[in-house]
Structure formats: structure tokens, C-alpha cells
Amino acid sequence: MGSRHGARRVGDRRRLREVGRNRVLEESSISEDRLDAALAYHRAYHDEVDEKILENDRPLLYWRKRYPHLTIQTIEHRPETGAPRAP
């Protein structure tokens, strides 16, 4: 996995500040090195990363309208993907 993908998985620095570095590491499968690489990538390419984060955060209805022939399912929490637990 490259740093760009890691940056999107981690989200933005606001999330890191809100929940804290240790919690991000505890609640995801991302390593400390990858977290550092993702944050460095975000610092260097913040506009691109933020754009992708906003795109990925669009509501399910948007994606169903955009891709009507796909079966889209939501995933609440899958630790193997590095996704944080839902609050």
C-alpha cells in the first residue's frame, strides 16, 4: 500500500487531533510507520487527499445513483481493512 492510500485511510489531520495518534493506531491495522508516511503525504498533497476524502464521504444514495447497476453494501467495521470502529 502506498502513502496516498494510507493517507486516505487515516483521513485527515483533524481526525488525528480529535481522537489522538494512539487511538488511531489502536483502532486500525495501520502501522506507526505507515501512519507517519500517510501524514507526511497529506502534508505534501493535502488538496488531493482532502478532495478524495470528501469524494469518499459522499452519501450512499449518491453512489447508488451514479452506479445504478452495482450492488453497493455498507461495511460497519472490518479491522482487516484498517477502518476505524463506528462510534
Image (cartoon, rainbow, N blue to C red):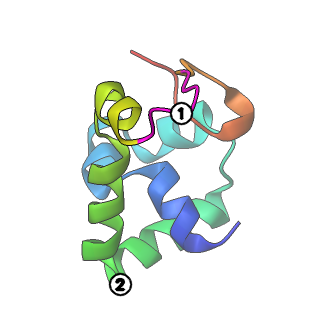
Q: Residue furthest bottom?
A: 44
Q: Position of residue 55 (x, y in %)?
A: 31, 52
> In the rendered image, which quarter contains the N terminus?
bottom right
- For residue 67, side relative to residue 49 (left or right): right
Q: Which residues are magenta?
A: 67-73
Residue at the image position 52 percent from the left and 71 percent from the top: 4
Q: Residue furthest right?
A: 80
Q: Position of residue 5 (x, y in %)?
A: 56, 63
Residue 71 lies in the magenta stretch = yes
Give yes or no for contact between labels 2 and 1 (Cβ–Cβ under 8 Å).
no
Task: Check disc 2 and give the amino acid type.
Answer: Ala
Q: Residues within 10 Å of mark 1 (few under 14, many from 20)?
A: few
Whether 68 is drawn above or below 32: the answer is: above
Q: Residues within 10 Å of mark 2 (few under 14, many from 20)?
A: few
Majority secondary structure of magenta residues: loop
Whether 81 is drawn above or below 11: the answer is: above
Q: Position of residue 56 (x, y in %)?
A: 38, 46
Residue at the image position 57 percent from the left and 35 percent from the top: 83
Residue 80 lies in the magenta stretch = no
Q: Which residue is mark 1?
A: 69
Nearest to the eye among marks 2 and 1: give it.
Answer: 1
In depth, the one of 20 and 59 nearer the eye is 59
Residue at the image position 65 percent from the left and 66 percent from the top: 33
Residue 77, picture quadrant:
top right
Q: Secondary structure at mark 1?
A: loop
Q: Secondary structure at mark 2?
A: helix
- For residue 37, side relative to residue 64 (left or right): right
Q: Which residue is mark 2?
A: 44
> How much space separates mark 2 and mark 1, taking CA atoms?
37 Å
- Sequence-wise first label, 2 or 1: 2
